[in-house]
Image (tube, rainbow, N blue to C red):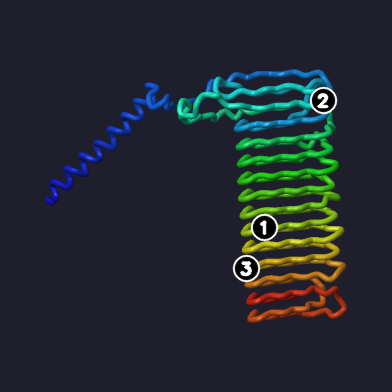
Amino acid sequence: MKTSTKVILITATSLVVVGLGLTAVASAAGGGFGNVVITSPDYEEVNYDFTSDINKLDIQESSHDVEFIKSTDSDTHVTVYDAKTYEHKVEVTGDTLKITSKSSKKAWYLNIGINVTNDSKIKTKIYLPEEKYDELLINVSSSDITVPSEFTFENTGIVSSSGDIFFSSKVENTCTVKTSSGEVILDDTDAKAVTVTTSSGDQDIRNLNGSEVKIEASSGEILIENCDLTGLSSVSSSGSLNLTDVKAEGALDFQTSSGEVRLVNISADKMTGRSSSGDISLSDLVLTSESSINTSSGDVDVKNSSFFYDVTTSSGDIKVDNNKEGITLKIETTSGDVTAR
């Protein structure tokens, strides 16, 4: 085929593609293709006021962020934003405040479009007058959740898909948080039992006291700082685990695949650590019972700590300054190096 013919065919094909694109845009603008449109919903602010006593909160939200705020009077106030395609139901049943959201019931092919909402004011706001409540249950999809330090709950359960969770209220008994890709930040929560489960979302846990903490994560990074705990258990895959200034009255257990582990200024009764290929770094570690670390190809480095090191390795190098009067720390590796000083 001649070069000139190729150029003509390529040009013609490009014009057809551009023409189809312009047709699609024009059709969308005119409501064609099953009302394919680019929209910015015309949201309307709707306010609810409740004077009755409320002890429990049940929040079911899809895409709007959820924020809890201390009320300036003795009533409970709720602000939501509704549109023709997105509405809320807000009611008090018994002593429970229930908020649910729902999208339009139209067939999906009649609602194809791009929903654009950039206004930061479009969020569900809950103004609470009391400082303490029995139960907080939240189930959202892509919503961010903010619960400030002004409140205390007996029990809390939060489930989210991709939204971030910022939680700093006190919880007296159990605090359970589960999310997929959203980030979780817990600060000064102090629940007796704290369970945080994430997939790819990071976990940032700070200033907890008297809590039994259980962590599960896939690829998200785990950061735990300045906590005085009754116990800590962490299971992760490729995400790193970083602990700084953490005390555990009981056991400290961690298990990871390829994620790195870094522990600084840690004290616990007993520690059990397992890793596949991730490196393990320990500094200023204090233990009161015999403990162990087991890794395959990951290196183990212990600094500023005093133990009797019982080290077993296949092909890894060993450099250890031993203290035969200290608590025994067993370290077993396959090909990883072990350094202790």
Mark number, residue 277: 3
Of pointers 1 and 3, the one earlier in the residue sequence: 1
Question: Residue at horizontal 78%, vertical 48%?
Answer: 194
Instruction: Report how far apart the C-alphas of labels 1 and 2 lie in the structure.
Output: 39 Å
Between 304 and 68, which is closer to the camera in this rendering? 68
**Tally of numbered tags:** 3
Amino acid type indicated by mark 3: Ser
Percent x, y of residue 125: 69, 27
* Frontmost residue, 135 versus 280: 135
How many C-alpha atoms fall within 10 Å of the one at disc 1: few (<14), some, or many (≥20)?
A: many
Q: Secondary structure at mark 2?
A: loop
Q: Are marks 2 and 3 in contact (CB under 8 Å)?
A: no
User: From mark 2 to mark 3, how far is it between C-alphas?
Assistant: 52 Å
Q: Can you tell which of label 2 and label 3 is closer to the viewer?
A: 2
| Between discs 2 and 3, the one toward the N terminus | 2
Q: Is residue 78 left or right of residue 335?
A: right
> Which residue does the numbered mark 1 point to in the structure image?
236
Tag on residue 8? none
Residue lying at 60% horizontally and 37% vertically, measured from the top left: 142
Q: Amino acid at mark 1?
A: Ser
Of the two numbered discs 1 and 2 in the rendering, the one whose residue sits closer to the viewer = 2
Residue type marked 2: Asp
| Residue underneath mark 2 | 95
